[in-house]
Amino acid sequence: MVDTIEILAIIIPLLVIAYMLLSSLRIVRPIEKGLVERFGRYHRFVEGGITLLLPIADRIIKVNTTERMTPVQRQDVITKDKVFMGVDAVVFYKVKPDEISVKASQYNVANFQSQIDTLARTVLRDIIGGMDMTIANTSRPTINKALKEALDEQTEKWGIEIIRAEIKDLEPPRELIISMESVLKADNDRQAAEKTAIAQATLASGEKNASIQRAEGNKQAAILQAEGQKIGTITIAEGDAQATKLRNEALTTYFKDTAIVFKQLDTIQASLQNNTKIIVPEGKAISLILNEQENMTKATIIPITAQKQDTTSKKS
């Protein structure tokens, strides 16, 4: 019995010591910083890793230093031109990792997350309240920049760094949206009508120009055709005249003495086609006719004696 008591007297203090040692060990993650307080007062700053606390006397406050996001509660803001607009926003921030900033985030503000939300709503009312609705709708980058600068100025003493602040939604009243859509539709219809009219005018102009070009082409083709016909007619006439001239020159040059005889022969040949009797003088004419007799099968040739010229002269 005594041995058991002695064993328990040894084991129990050891267990208490082991518990106190284990409970005094704290692990701080790399994304966190620690503030150690001893008897309720700030004692030291702890980086990531294992730290040993004094049992009962010490406690540690772990602070996350990564970037976080706080949604700004939706609110209705009245613009400069008396239009109510619903505004949603988000703020991205983080606690600065240095000792002073970490201490400020815990000792200078009770709950910096809710404070940022409230401060952002107040700043947005001031910014958008000084703008007209149309300007506010087209000035989101300006609003975001002004909101970030205002939050930076207010949260600097809390050890908070504002990464960015952005407007999620900026919505005018439903009635105003319907009215704006009607105006926009009417404007789109007007632009479409103008573009259609311009297209039709362009098409008509193109067709007109095409008709003019076709008419000009037909005109030029008719002119060229007439000129070609004229030149062809002149060329044929000149050719016929040249041929006639050459024939006349040939008759004059090579058949000077018998040109009249050939003319008579042409007349005789035409007459013989109808079985006509021809009376011709003797001499060269009869001999030429005889040479052509084989082509005169239906004609009868009667030669006569030609009187001498001097006898004709005496009778006169």
Image (cartoon, helix red, strand yellow):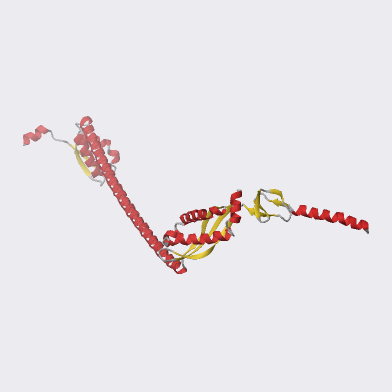
Q: Residue at x 46, y 60 (%)?
A: 126
State the residue at coordinates (61%, 49%).
99
Q: Is residue 23 left or right of residue 142?
A: right
Which residue is drawn at the image coordinates 55% and 57% (left, top)?
A: 91
Q: Quadrant of residue 135?
A: bottom left
Between residue 131 and residue 312, name the one nearer to us.
131
Rendered location of residue 57, percent (x, y): 71, 55
Q: Position of residue 178 (x, y in %)?
A: 45, 68
Q: Position of residue 50 (x, y in %)?
A: 71, 49
User: Residue 279 in the image: x percent, y percent?
Assistant: 19, 41
Q: Residue furthest right?
A: 1
Instruction: Give whichever of 11, 295 is nearer the camera.
Output: 11
- Which quadrant holds residue 291? top left
Work out which quarter of the rendered image holds the N terminus and state it: bottom right
Residue 294 visible in the picture = yes
* Front one among 250 and 286: 250
Left or right? Give the position of 191 relative to 298: right
In-image side of 154 versus 30 (left or right): left
